[in-house]
Amino acid sequence: MDGLIGACIGRLGGDAELKYTTNAKPILCFRAVVQDRAAQERGETPQWLRCAVFGPEAVELVGRLHKGDEAYLEGRLSLRRWTGQDGTERSGLDLVVSRCEPLGQIGRRAPARPAHDAAPVHAAHARPAGEALETDDQLPF
């Protein structure tokens, strides 16, 4: 990968949106804010990134990136400049994401598992209800 490479942990500013190019290739677009605690305590403005994930990974991530979620983001950075509607010069960072790892997803938005889908107890480890294990030597593992 050529160019300026960056890695950060950011919090999504909105749900990720899946779009398609004219050639029907998927692009997942979202914005992420990055700011460390020290910068926040100094009152510095947080940095917003406009992020894009291309290809099959975009489709895989579409249901996993929601507003407020944190994600590890890695990819190629570029500076974008434009003139705002009020005539002022503005700039922002774009990140073409090569690696995206949602963080803190354990147990969140996971469908509940019905009790009948629970893993079966093997007959070798089963014991009558109410019978307690008295020593560590009796543990089945």
Image: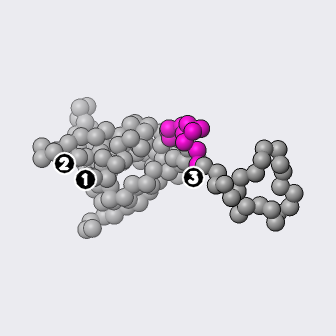
Q: Which mark is residue 55?
A: 1
Q: Is residue 96 left or right of residue 43?
A: left
Residue type, numbered disc 2 = Lys
Residue at the location (86% across, 61% down)?
135
Q: Which badge, 2 or 1, is on the more N-terminal residue?
A: 2
Measure the alpha-carbon separation of dots 1 and 3: 36 Å
106 part of magenta stretch: no
Amino acid type at mark 1: Gly
| Marks 2,1: beta carbons within 8 A | yes
Closer to the N terminus: mark 3 or mark 2? 2
**Would you say 113 lies left or right of 89 here?**
right
Using the rendered image of the protein, determine whether residue 92 is visible from the camera's viewpoint: no
* Foreground tag (3 vs 2): 2
**Residue 107 x %, y %:** 56, 44
Residue at left offset 42%, top offset 44%: 64
Q: Secondary structure at mark 3?
A: helix
Disc 3 marks which residue?
38
